[in-house]
Image (tube, grey):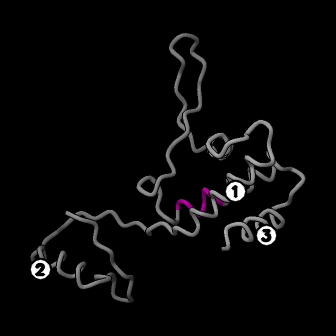
Amino acid sequence: MADIYLRRVAAGFVPDSDADHERLRKFKVGEVVRAKVAKPRNYEHHKKLFALLRFIAENSDVYNTERKALTVLKILTGHVEFIADPRTGELIAQPDSISYEAMDQIEFDEWYNNAVNAACQHITPHMNRMDMDQALDMVAHW
């Protein structure tokens, strides 16, 4: 079954569109269903993340690509799974996904906030959080 978008109202949730209402009609009244509720990601916020990644890549000799910038932010925020190298036993940080499917907007908000703080502290220590937010807002047109 396709995703169904619901709108929060005082009494609970209601279908957000006619198409969502039609999808819900396939269930009998009183029937128990399983649902995973998530707040959809904000595309504009996603663009702001890529503004941060570009900013890091353009201002770092070490993390000079968006991919490297994203990887280091995942590591700095602890958004990783540790895997043992079978040869040495050394634990290696394997970054987890921040895809739309992996994180809803609430989880992304928290991760993004931690990522900007980590960037300010470890990658661009010459910038405070307020200056970083202003720079990203201008670039991402937030």
Q: Secondary structure at mark 2?
A: loop
In the image, which disc is placed on residue 19?
none
Where is residue 7, by image quadrant?
bottom left
Front residue of 61 and 74: 61
Residue at point 50%, 14% (across, down): 86
Q: Nearer the viewer, mark 3 or mark 2?
A: 3
Above or below residue 135? Residue 116 is: above
Tell me the SS state at disc 3. helix
Point 74% across, 71% down: residue: 138
- Give me the C-alpha separation between circle 2 and circle 1: 47 Å
Percent x, y of residue 104: 46, 62
Residue at 60% across, 56% down = 111
The image quarter in which residue 52 lies: bottom right
- Judging by the rendered image, the residue that carries numbered circle 2 is 29
The residue at which mark 1 appears reads as: 52
Q: Picture coordinates of residue 33 (x, y %)?
A: 19, 66
Q: Amino acid at mark 2?
A: Val
- Label located before the other in sequence (3 or 1): 1
Question: CA gap, disc 3 to disc 1?
Answer: 11 Å
Q: Quadrant of the C terminus?
A: bottom right
Name the residue located 59 percent from the left edge and 26 percent from the top edge: 92
Q: Determine the image quadrant of residue 71.
A: top right
Lateral position of residue 86 relative to residue 56, left or right: left
The reply, left or right, for residue 31 in relation to residue 89 is left
In the foreground, 37 or 62: 62
Q: Which residue is mark 3?
A: 134
> Callout 2: few (<14), some (14-19), or many (20+) C-alpha neighbours within 10 Å?
few
Query: Residue 97: image x %, image y %?
Result: 49, 46
Highlighted magenta segment, given as a residue range: 107-112
Tag 1: residue type? Leu
Circle 1 residues within 10 Å: few <14, some 14–19, many ≥20: many
